[in-house]
Amino acid sequence: MAEPNNPYQEKIDNDKKNLVQLKAGTANQQLINAAYLGARQEPPAVMTWMNAAQSGLTSFAEAIDESKKVRQAKLDEMNGTIDAQIENLTTTGFSLGETYYGAANEYTKQLREKYLAAEGNPEEQNKIKMELNVASQNIGSTKTAIEDIATAWGVNDDESTLERSGLSEDQKNIITTVTNDANAIWDYEKNTFVWKDPNDPTKTYTIKDIQDIQKLASRDYVGKEKYIKEEQDLIQNGMLFKEDGTGPPFNPRKQTLVNEKRLTKENINFYINGDFTNDGTPSFSKEFRNHPDFKLDNPDNVIFKALESSGKYPDRPGSTPGFDLTDMPDPSPGDGEYTPDDLAKLAEDVYNAVTDENADGYNLDVTKNLVAEYMTLRQQEKFYGGKKDFDKMKLMNPENFDSWDAYVAAGGNKGYAKQVLGWTRIPETRDKKGRIKTIERWYKNKNVGFTQRSY
């Protein structure tokens, strides 16, 4: 019912209609497609560096497995909740619901009262108009942010531009909270919508929180395309190196530096959890537990040393020198011992310190080094034709063959034999009368092998 003698009633009615119709039409489906190179191959064999020995502590392994199952069940439940809420948003054209309308209507009602009270004070009324204009822009930004995160999440994992498997529970909780309009409230101090965490009323999330998730969890399609192209080039160069002996050998040290440069704070999440190879190779996060350096009974563990030197996991005073799991706080100190469940929790903490940027002890440089190593070892195998070929090649002696062709046909690598090991095939030479001057034979230059050790 119209308020009597209210000259602004028509504006109020029009504002109500506009608020109800806060829509931007269909979702903006601007997904970047990576230029996948070559045919998709069969998943390769598990790489050398992941062939770690199984732990002898069966109960410890079972405890780890159980903790992983519990965490995965929780993540699956959160994924399902987000899927349902985003499906609802898509169905309604991303319109802001009644909660948004009620909060915005209450806010604008208070502004109108202030505006009427400022009658005769044009300067004050102009300030109120500006405040209303800013609020209107913020409402539009809110709607855009919701639509952007919903579109990025996608209808399923394959169509998502986010690396869902790399999202933390906190990040998924933010998405769950924001995509449910029941959690929206108006922040009078910031003059915009925020979202209150239903599980923790002391926490509120802003548009920036959503945008940060997209910034840190988006799939690096451009970087992926570049990586795949570089691998294709390595494969081609490796073939020429093997069969013709041309070009330089694979240089792990230089390649590791190249890989480290491609990793940044913004894209590291994707390279930890995502499929950046496009050939079925397991992600770094899935294979990292099998890294030989992650063996928990090794006090000289490279990863432990890196975490210790980062300053976030210091060696406990009075303990055995060198970082190990017992340098970490006992999860259940009351029992006076490290139980299998305790060890599983501590191992998970170390694992998270490498793979989860939100975890205690996370150090970007440590993680970058390990991911770069993962890439480099994979690229080395690609260059030399695979692990089996690489191992066989290193053991083959060219002296056992009559020619380069026979050596290469048997699986040898001409470039590796010549440039890394120093072997060459001296051809037969004859004088003008046809007499043999030089017998065809193999010759090994020991200095070449010495030079290559710097690689």
Image: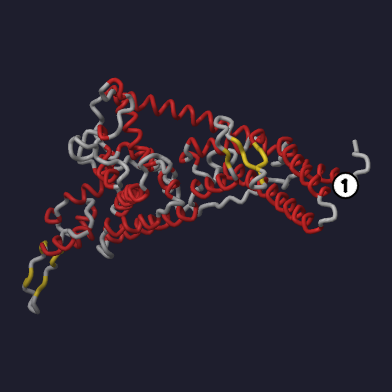
Write down the quadrant of residue 326 in the picture.
top left
Decide: is 453 above or below 46: below
Which residue is located at x 27 percent, y 57 percent?
A: 253
Residue type, label 1: Tyr
Q: Residues within 10 Å of mark 1 (few under 14, many from 20)?
A: few
Which residue is located at x 11 percent, y 62 percent?
A: 444
Decide: is 416 above or below 139: below
Which residue is located at x 54 percent, y 33 percent?
A: 79
Residue furthest right in the image: 5
Direction from residue 449 to residue 245 in the image, left or right: right
Write down the quadrant of residue 57 in the picture.
top left
Q: Nearer the viewer, residue 45 or 97?
A: 97
- Residue 162 in the image, given as x and y percentages of width and height: 52, 44
- Residue 206 in the image, given as x and y percentages of width and height: 59, 44
The residue tagged 1 is: 8
Res 239 visible:
no
Label 1 secondary element: loop
Direction from residue 115 to residue 418 in the image, left or right: left
Name the quarter where the C terminus is drawn.
bottom left
Q: Nearer the viewer, residue 343 or 235?
A: 343
Name the quarter where the N terminus is drawn.
top right
- Residue 82 in the image, given as x and y percentages of width and height: 58, 34
Res 59 visible:
yes
Decide: is 300 above or below 417: above
Q: Nearer the viewer, residue 38 or 206?
A: 206
Direction from residue 193 to residue 369 in the image, left or right: left
Which residue is located at x 35 percent, y 39 percent?
A: 287
- Residue 55 in the image, given as x and y percentages of width and height: 25, 29
